[in-house]
Image (cartoon, grey):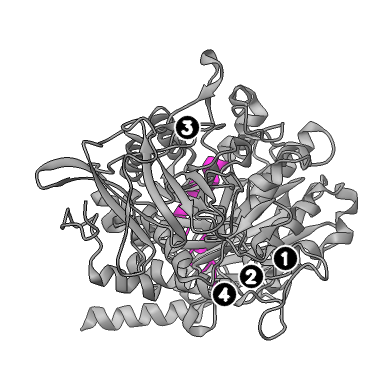
Amino acid sequence: MGNNLEVINDKSFFTDQDIYLFKEGKHFRLYDKLGAHVCQRQGTSGTYFSLWAPNAQIVSVIGDFNNWDKGAHKLFPRWDHSGIWEGFIPDVTQSAIYKYFIVSKYNNFSIDKTDPVGFFCEEPPQTSSIVWDLEYQWHDAGWMATRSTKNALNSPQAIYELHLGSWRRKVEENDRFLTYREISRALVDYIKKSGFTHVEFMPVMEHPFYGSWGYQSLGYFAPSHRYGNPQDLMFLIDLLHQNDIGVILDWVPSHFPSDGHGLVYFDGSHLYEHADPQKGFHPDWKSYIFNHGRNEIKEFLISSALFWFDQYHIDGIRVDAVASMLYLDYSRKDGEWTPNIYGGRDNIEAIDFIKLLNETVYKAFPDVQMVAEESTAWPSVSRPTYSGGLGFGMKWNMGWMHDTLEYFKLDPLYRKFHHNDLTFSMLYAFTENFVLALSHDEVVHGKCSLLNKMPKDDWQKFANLRALFCYMYAHPGKKLLFMGSEFGQWSEWYHERSLDWHLLEYPLHQGVYRLIQDLNLLYKQEPALYRCDFDHPGFEWIHVGDWQNSILAFMRKDPDSVQEQVLAVCNFTPVPHKDYRIGFPYKAFLKEILNSDSSIYGGSGCLNGGGVQAEPIAHHGREYSISLNIPPLGVVYLKPDSIPPADHPAEENKVEENKVKEKE
């Protein structure tokens, strides 16, 4: 076999243009070229293999097809000094198991490695790659044609986060995982019934250690074999799309595990990771940090992101641990980190990578979302790169999550001294495009489930949880709930066990789940609750000063229609308030559209008879006000049934404009 291969097919042959882009650091679809591609050459079926290993002296493909003979099928280095090795092996087809045997130029180092761009791997603890074709007949054309509206920043997004291995299990079969296909129908039905708009899967990329939950990934182009093959995952995503449910994947471009068959010390050199341990090794996670300043690594990671959008039709990526990439001193003490060229702590190379990643994804797929898990106050994370931002579409609001959960854990008697823990979030709510995330991280490692964080007796725990959810859904920002929270899971999440589905047999848990269903439905029906999640005009404080009673009142608004408003009144103590007066800007009848204390949710039934009339009694700086029954540990949503044009100049002007148009 010669070094210059014939054209095999479009996906498995490096052209001069490919090599030029690769050397320039601009080839972002490396999965079309690197890896193992089933194809034909001169009428012979086989597989084309290609690997980037610039510091290798020998590269050969070993596998079940050649009895793991290191000398049977050697690859050849390309003549263009790209560091790419390639070769065609006849009669190697779908399902063949393989690795690369690499002998380094340095110290006679040799090792067997999994394919970094392999599309499928053996199920851990086995470590070989599997030759696999990604052909699949999709049936989600309707979703793909319209998903820009579902993923838009002004659309409702209620995200259900889940871990595939522990959502449900086959208890009768030694508590085994459900496969992608086995889980598909039950998951689709449940998401539709619950009313969520998107699912977010914790990493499905192949990972050696199951207990890492996928955050110690090695299969940057391979879904985990634990749950099935690539087409099985495609089937699951396809079915979700056919039922108008978007799919977000967690993805980890910050670090990778130290398993010897993986990326670490790949060709006898620090190829994927920094050679300097102060830059290349993560002290918390005992993992290796990508060298984001190297062109080939940027191409590898960006190609991975594009791969999941391109080949698996996903609708968004949540990028894990962004803060660890932004700061050179992240989780390091003085003397344990190396400053940048300007003497600062900003990781300039990683920042440039993040910007390039987001620019490339949005250019290729403008109808998707890139979401950052970023836990610091780094500015403009979700602002465009052309205005100095990092270029993400949205960012998890970690500050809101922390302050809110700390507040709700308090005995209601002491909440009045922490009133500003809730009001503070509105000082920065519109500085980023925030997702309000109550994620898996908040219900593990001794932190308790959401329900068990709540103080006092069982009734108050459930009332607090319902109040938390209603406050969350009224607060500006997209919504994310981790599995089990939606029905009040008592125990912490554990990745080796299914959720406690039997709890849905009990009335209080049924009440929490019904509330989530109604919140998701109302959230999608009321534009005021989502259209201006990221803009000041979508929010207005009505009453923020009653810290003694832990009461808040605010409005969510759709600036395009004064009729589209929702007033949220929150009481975070177990004391009900009868005839509590709340200011309101207009004369209107306010319909009670949701009350977390309703008996159908397990509450005490402190309601308002369907609604209240705004009276011409000035209060809280407004010309009108309402007299409200505020339930204990409860939240009430009210919506103006109608606002007379005379009571709102903008509406009066619209009426006059319509009259003129009718005459014309």
Residue 326 is tagged as 2
C-alpha distance separating marks 2 and 3? 33 Å
Which is nearer the N-term, disc 1 or disc 4? 1
- 307 or 132: which is nearer to us? 132
Dot 2 or dot 4: first in sequence order is 2
Please identify the quadrant where the C terminus is shown. bottom left
The residue that mark 4 highlights is 349
Q: Residue at x 30, y 51 (%)?
A: 143
Which residue type does callout 3 highlight? Glu
Q: Are marks 1 and 2 in contact (CB under 8 Å)?
A: yes
- Residue shown at 62% from the left, 45% from the top: 609
The residue type indicated by label 4 comes to Glu
Which is closer to the viewer, label 1 or label 4?
4
Q: Magenta span has 529?
A: yes
Amino acid, disc 2: Leu
Q: Secondary structure at mark 3?
A: loop
Q: Secondary structure at mark 4?
A: helix
Residue named by callout 1: 330
- Image height of 384 relative to 579, above or below: below
- Expressed as whole percent of the image width and height from the top left, the position of residue 263 reads 52, 52
Q: Is residue 56 left or right of residue 624?
A: left
